[in-house]
Image (spheres, helix red, strand yellow):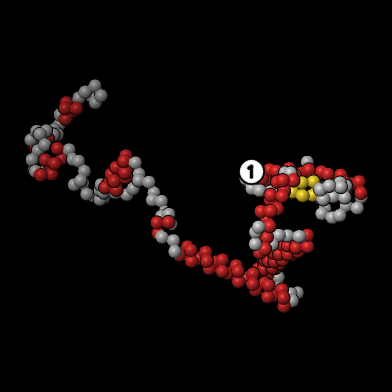
Amino acid sequence: MTRKKVKLAFITNDSARKATFKKRKKGLMKKVSELSTLCGIDACAIIYSPYESQPEVWPNTLGVQRVLAQFKRMPEMEQSKKMVNQESFIRQRIAKASEQLKKQHKENREKEMTEVMYQCLTGKGLQNLIMADINDLGWVLDQNLKEIYKRIESLKKMTPTQVAPPAAPPPPPPQVAAATCEMLARGVHGQEQKPAVESGNVEGMQRPQWYTEWMNNPNENLGFGHGDEMMMQFADNHNAMWSSAFFP
């Protein structure tokens, strides 16, 4: 569970104020002891209170006297260099809070004008803005333009090696490359080039041997006998020639 922040103000209740004093006094003595032990420095504490007749000191009376004597031997300028009282401490706190408030106000104003800039980009006009708002909006625009120009200059100064070149496509496998070259040699991709045969041209076609010999020597017979033998003698007894079981 988070500890509740204590309001730094005078406690009006007597019993509550006394209990707080005892608790915080013990914590203060413990912190001084830890600081002296961890850092190896000379420190002392003197606490006066209306609840006790004698002041409470740390570490002891002799230790306090030694530290005070060492402090008094320092020059006056060195003694008051880092000395703070309640008034100066409060002034320091007020100045610090004022700086934080001013910074937060500037951040809020910048976010507000950035929102107005985005609304203008969507088509909303500037009719409802006063002169102070317009000046602040101009400052926001200038800051954004400076960031854009700065980014452009940084990109221009980048060396070519810093910009990654486009990756080259991987080479095709050897089998695919060989098949592609063979297909290109034959003709159109994926199709074999067939020999063209013109109509009526039988030179490119394979001919039988007897046809070739007859074309070269048309007057010679083709080995089926002489020309006279090819002629059949028709006489009166032609039926004897055609006599057979089918033709009586």
Up the image or down, 165 lies above or below 186; here it is below
Q: Give x and y (percent) for residue 191.
A: 33, 45
Q: Which residue is located at x 58 percent, y 69 percent?
A: 145
Q: Give x and y (percent) for residue 149.
A: 53, 68
Whether residue 236 sits left or right of residue 53 in the image: it is left
Up the image or down, 60 lies above or below 123; here it is above
Foreground residue, 57 or 1?
Answer: 57
Q: Is mark 1 on a helix, strand or loop?
A: helix
Up the image or down, 135 lies above or below 90; here it is below
Question: Circle 1 is placed at which residue position?
Answer: 38
Query: Count of labels shown?
Result: 1
**Quadrant of the frame with the C terminus:** top left
Q: Which residue is located at x 70 percent, y 46 percent?
A: 63
Foreground residue, 137 or 16?
Answer: 16
Q: Which residue is located at x 83 percent, y 47 percent?
A: 54
> Counting other residues with Cα less than 10 Å from the Cα at mark 1, is it few (<14), some (14-19), or many (20 or more)?
few
Q: Give x and y (percent) for residue 138.
A: 65, 73
- Amino acid at the residue labelled 1: Leu
**Quadrant of the frame with the N terminus:** top right
Foreground residue, 127 or 24?
Answer: 24
